[in-house]
Amino acid sequence: MGAAVVSNPVDVLKTRFQIHGEGIDSKSLGLVNGTIKIIRNEGISAMYKGLTPSLLREATYSTLRMGGYDVIKNYFIDSNGKTNLLSKVTSGAVSGALGACITSPTDLIKVRMQASSNGVKYTSISSAFKEIIAKEGIKGLWKGVGPTTQRAALLTASQIPSYDHIKHLILDHGIIEVDGLQVHIVSSIFAGLIASITTSPVDLVKTRIMNQPFDSNGVGLVYKSSFDCFKKTFKNEGISGLYKGFLPNWFRIGPHTIVTFILYEYLRKISGIKPI
């Protein structure tokens, strides 16, 4: 939740980039120009659109994926007390997928609120739940659950294991000798970059599917499925279209990852839990 507060402005910018120029080969808005445009047209508070569902999402989804990672990884510990990289990746993918599948409604609301440039999409989380259920049914809350789960599996499989592995490589080779703030920051920077490269295309697909209009039967009017969105984006916008919003995505995941792991390691320490 602490990381979400820090990264929400970039998350809003990333979401706008991903839906900008859908279906055409358009040039990027630009980080600075995009930020100025949002603030000029909607006010500074627009950079914190979707913060409440974002906090709720982190309190549920991130709790499940990060807590679950440790639980699952423990099943792969060998006789020397070590866990190999494949086991870490598997643990991250499973915990991320489970967490995202269960908490997908919070992500749906967050995306729709951040994508709205015409006033407020929903007045509150409770009103969002009520409106979605009334118009789209209970199933409507899980629209986009496929790409959301895919993204979460890729994110957690790349972010936490890479942090875990890089951190222990640094410590084991004596590059940094103390398991403290310095190694946490360095490991987080690399983990954030790896996660951004891995997840950007599926994150774009997730955002577009969640933000598209639906008919009375709950069928998307623009994309029929994740693959359909991927195919249309690639056909109309090229490979670069799949990486729209990459820079704000990286600028979001980078600080988000650093804050997450610094706080996570600190909370583990004061709670008497061994470091990652």
Image (cartoon, rainbow, N blue to C red):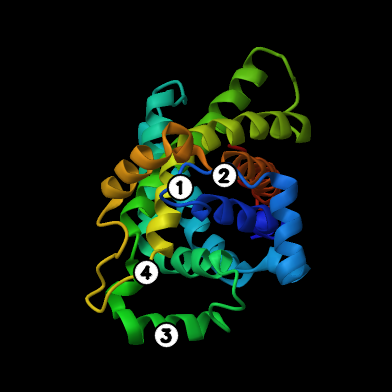
Question: Do the CB atoms of the residues marked 3 and 4 lie less than 8 Å apart?
Answer: no
Q: Looking at the rendered structure, which numbered label has been put on residue 246?
A: none
Q: Looking at the rendered structure, which numbered label has been put on residue 203?
A: 1
Q: Nearer the viewer, mark 4 or mark 1?
A: 4
Q: Is residue 77 above or below residue 174?
A: below
Disc 4 is placed on an element classified as: loop
Question: Do the CB atoms of the residues marked 1 and 2 lie less than 8 Å apart?
Answer: yes
Of the image marks 4 and 1, the number of the one nearer the N terminus: 1
Residue nearest the viewer, comparing 99 with 196: 196
Q: Quadrant of residue 91?
A: top left
For the residue marked with disc 3, what is the amino acid?
Glu
For the residue marked with disc 4, what is the amino acid?
Pro
Disc 1 is placed on an element classified as: helix
Q: CA distance from mark 4 to mark 2?
A: 21 Å
Q: Which residue is mark 3?
A: 131
Q: Nearer the viewer, mark 1 or mark 2?
A: 2
Q: Residue at x 71, y 70 (%)?
A: 42
Q: CA distance from mark 3 to mark 1?
A: 25 Å
Label 4: how many Cα within 10 Å (few below 14, some 14–19, many 20+) = few
Residue nearest the viewer, comparing 20 with 48: 20
Q: CA distance from mark 3 to mark 4?
A: 14 Å
Q: CA distance from mark 4 to mark 1?
A: 18 Å
Q: Looking at the rendered structure, which numbered label has been put on residue 245?
A: 2
Q: CA distance from mark 1 to mark 2?
A: 9 Å
> Where in the figure is residue 176, as x and y percent of width and height?
74, 20
Of the image marks 3 and 4, the number of the one nearer the N terminus: 3
Disc 2 is placed on an element classified as: loop
Q: Residue at x 27, y 74 (%)?
A: 215
Indicate the quadrant containing the N terminus: top left, top right, bottom left or bottom right.
bottom right
For the residue marked with disc 2, what is the amino acid?
Gly
Of the image marks 3 and 1, the number of the one nearer the N terminus: 3
